[in-house]
Image (cartoon, helix red, strand yellow):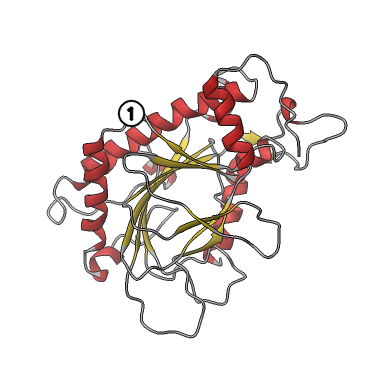
């Protein structure tokens, strides 16, 4: 599909971003503003949390998409025959969650992991700030006012941080085993921090058979950014949400994903710069919260 955005005089950053989002949907982000020391602290904190015994982690069992999910609790691709994806995770929702509405982050006690919550909150804020700056460039690249997404989607933004651990040894099995089975992310954009262990792969043509998978290589100090399904809907498939997966490598792997999503009440509908008479909107308008809730239900099978 050729770009529908009317190409005004774009900066080199905007031209580069359009190419990355239309051709790949995955790219590396440098100069993101998160200090290297904090990147290392949050990766170390990730290891510290998942090294806790299962009994301790299950005290923080996932509620309202916040807390711990054990191995095989998720299946991102419901078509695969495995019992679930071979990863465990821990979700942190918006730091300003409202307990009165039942939304409340869960945290391990300071006695068990002293200083851990502070590190995670610092990284949440750093990733949020990086995402806010990036989304301004996205708006400009789409020929929108730089504050477009602030005005329509970020009142306030709906950011989720997800700590991930992929075990190294999984034992023998006759079934398919995936660290994370093939999927595209649900929201606007994802910023991913990895520890350098391989396993992440992308499929650039998600509707083509047979699927061809490419390794995503690690570049120290960068965040990997990928476009989510809601951004694909907003742009009428101009920006692509790329299919990706994590394959077991026999080594433990840790990563930290930050999902920048719209406010649940935001209505996601095709941007005027991304449709015309010959290319009408492909998707009906939908409330962001309803869309995310339905996708999460499929992931957890409930």
Specify the quadrant of the image occupied by residue 25. top right
In the rendered image, residue 243, in percent from the top left (x then y), is placed at 58, 54
- Left or right, 172 with respect to 241, comes to left
Mark 1: few/some/many CA within 10 Å (<14, 14-19, 20+): few
* Along the viewing direction, whichever of 235 and 201 lies nearer the viewer: 201
In the rendered image, residue 200, in percent from the top left (x then y), is placed at 45, 57
Give the residue at x 36% y 29%. 31
Q: In the orientation shown, which residue stands out farthest toward the right?
A: 277
Q: In the orientation shown, which residue stands out farthest toward the top?
A: 9
Specify the quadrant of the image occupied by residue 301. bottom right
In the depicted structure, whether residue 32 falls above or below residue 59: above
> In the rendered image, which quarter contains the N terminus?
top right
* Residue marked by disc 1: 33
Give the residue at x 39% y 33%. 30
> In the rendered image, which quarter contains the C terminus?
bottom right
In the rendered image, residue 150, in percent from the top left (x then y), is placed at 53, 24
- Left or right, 37 with respect to 138, comes to left
């Amino acid at each position: 599909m050729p770009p529908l955005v009317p190409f005004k005089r774009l900066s080199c950053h905007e031209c580069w971003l359009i190419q990355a989002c239309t051709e790949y949907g995955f790219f590396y982000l440098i100069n993101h503003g998160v200090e290297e020391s904090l990147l290392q602290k949050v990766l170390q904190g990730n290891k510290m949390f998942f090294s806790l015994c299962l009994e301790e982690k299950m005290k923080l069992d996932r509620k309202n998409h916040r807390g711990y999910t054990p191995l095989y609790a998720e299946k991102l691709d419901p078509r695969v025959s495995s019992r679930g994806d071979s990863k465990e995770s821990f979700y942190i929702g918006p730091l300003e969650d409202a307990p009165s509405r039942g939304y409340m982050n869960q945290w391990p006690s300071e006695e068990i992991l002293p200083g851990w919550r502070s590190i995670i909150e610092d990284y949440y804020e750093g990733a949020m700030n990086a995402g806010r700056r990036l989304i301004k460039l996205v708006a400009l690249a789409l020929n929108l006012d730089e504050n477009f997404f602030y005005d329509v989607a970020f009142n306030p933004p709906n950011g989720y941080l997800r700590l991930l651990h992929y075990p190294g040894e999984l034992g023998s099995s006759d079934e398919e085993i995936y660290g994370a089975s093939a999927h595209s992310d649900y929201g606007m954009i994802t910023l991913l921090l990895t520890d350098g262990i391989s396993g992440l792969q992308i499929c650039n043509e998600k509707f083509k058979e047979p699927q061809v998978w490419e390794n995503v290589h690690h570049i120290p100090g960068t965040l990997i950014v990928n476009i989510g399904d809601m951004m694909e809907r907003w742009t009428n498939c101009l920006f692509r949400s790329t299919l990706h997966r994590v394959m077991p490598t026999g080594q433990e792997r840790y990563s930290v994903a930050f999902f920048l999503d719209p406010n649940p009440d935001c209505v996601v509908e095709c941007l005027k710069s991304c449709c015309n008479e010959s290319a009408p909107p492909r998707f009906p308008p939908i409330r962001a919260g309803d869309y995310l809730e339905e996708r999460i239900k499929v992931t957890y099978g409930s």
